[in-house]
Image (tube, rainbow, N blue to C red):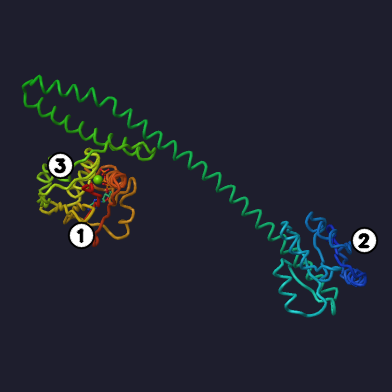
Amino acid sequence: MGTDLKADRAAPGPATRVLLIDDDEDDRFLTEERLADVPGRPYTLDWTPHYGEGLEAICTGTHDVYLLDFHLGARTGIELLREARARGRSAPVILFTGQAHSRTDLEALDAGADDYLEKAGLTASLLDRAIRFAVAQSRAAAELERKVQERTEELARVNAALREADKRKDEFLALLAHELRNPLTPITNALEILRLANDTGDTVRRQRERMERQVAQLKRLVEDLLDVSRITTGKLRLTIETLTVQDIMESVLDMSRSLFEKAGLELIVDVPTAPVKLDGDRVRLTQVFGNILNNASKFTEPGGRVWLTVKPVGGRVTVSVRDTGVGISATVLPQLFGLFTQVDRTLNRSQSGLGIGLALVRKLVEMHGGTVSAHSEGPGTGATFTVYLPVTRVA
Ligand SMILES: Nc1ncnc2c1ncn2[C@@H]1O[C@H](COP(=O)(O)OP(=O)(O)OP(=O)(O)O)[C@@H](O)[C@H]1O
Ligand SMILES: [Mg+2]
């Protein structure tokens, strides 16, 4: 490589190392002179006339800044820049152009030059300013890059921690549900024995019945929790058989009718008499419509009405449940089918549940190849839940 312009280092701090890549020795003298004229002489200059040497230097980062001539023998500084950029160079480069030529200038910037300078009329202060600016810009870019890198790593760490916590929460839920279920079976059995013993006394009977109700509620919650962990761990399984929608509605209504009576609601059922066949899991489909009807009864004031309507349409059957209840605002509608979504957590806790019902409904309906949607005109206007299920094709 060429001469080192070991200027006396009056300037504070280390000198900025400049490499000139230029096959014209006159340019080298010109640059040497201009740099020497910069007050404080803050630069050292090296020189190479060779394309290959220059490229290597830029790519390995031997200097703080590179001055690159447009003409390099048979090749151009632009080509060199493109090659260096393809190899991921990051050091600042300033391109020397022969004369004002906007196309070359644009090409230079496009190829990744930080700046370009016209050789004619080059003064010490122009050169100084261009170098300082390019170096500062490249430092700022490097600093930014470092910060982005740092934040990205930080985010990745937080993400990993969250995923781990989420996994442990799922495992904990599964464990909790199993542990809670274990004592329920012996308690239920003991209550059954008490009932069969038919042991007189009104007080005893009332208390026993109370315990039975509470245990039933506890069982429902635990079963829901178990279903949640089956959903999150992908272990939910269906037992498919050919059934009719009428079958399912019958068992749903068996379970739900008393609910509506107790809630003081009128239930209006419209199910066609001609059997509509479908392939599905009897228990799970009953659970789907049971959950939707349960919600309708929970979120409708006494004196209200609920319509259960079944309609076969083409290759599908739609089951809709409409109520005159509290309604749902447009903002929460899209989240309704997510796990643990509840609009009003201040509801009477004894009947408000865990916010699992609709998440289960969606999962189960989708596993049956169907869809479910919710509709409401807003608070106070009631709500409609509609389930679409594919029916069995008759051969
Ligand atoms: N028919 C309805 N009218 C108004 N809001 C409803 C209706 N059905 C559901 N919602 C709203 O959607 C929320 C989620 O329902 P979801 O069935 O998932 O949970 P939940 O009924 O609160 O508890 P869980 O079903 O686990 O016992 C409810 O808390 C309620 O805010
Ligand atoms: Mg519910």
Quick check: can you spot residue 6? no
Answer few, some or many: residues within 10 Å of disc 2's Cα (few below 14, many 20 plus, some between 14 and 19). Answer: few
Assign the N terminus to one quadrant of the image: bottom right
Quick check: can you spot residue 98? yes
The residue type indicated by label 1 comes to: Gly
Disc nearer the start of the sequence (3/1): 3
Residue 92 found in image quarter: bottom right
Query: Which label number is shown at residue 2?
Result: 2
Which of the four quarters of the rendered structure image does ligand 2 lie in?
top left
Question: Left of 206 or right of it: where is 372?
Answer: right
Where residue 8 appears, as percent x and y from the top left, is 93, 62
How far apart marks 3 and 1 lie (CA) works out to: 33 Å
* Proximity of marks 3 and 1: CB atoms separated by less than 8 Å: no
Q: Is mark 1 within 8 Å of ligand 1?
A: no
How far apart marks 2 and 3 lie (CA) works out to: 94 Å
The residue type indicated by label 2 comes to: Gly
Count of numbered labels shown in the rendering: 3
The residue type indicated by label 3 comes to: Asp
> Relative to residue 378, is residue 33 depicted above or below?
below
Name the element at disc 3.
helix
Query: Which label number is shown at residue 380?
Result: 1
How far apart marks 2 and 1 lie (CA) works out to: 85 Å
The residue labelled by disc 3 is 247
Answer few, some or many: residues within 10 Å of disc 1's Cα (few below 14, many 20 plus, some between 14 and 19). Answer: some
Residue 45 found in image quarter: bottom right
Query: Which label number is shown at residue 359?
Result: none
Where residue 126 appears, as percent x and y from the top left, is 81, 74
Tell me what residue is drawn at x 31 percent, y 46 percent: 359
Q: Nearer the viewer, mark 2 or mark 1?
A: 2
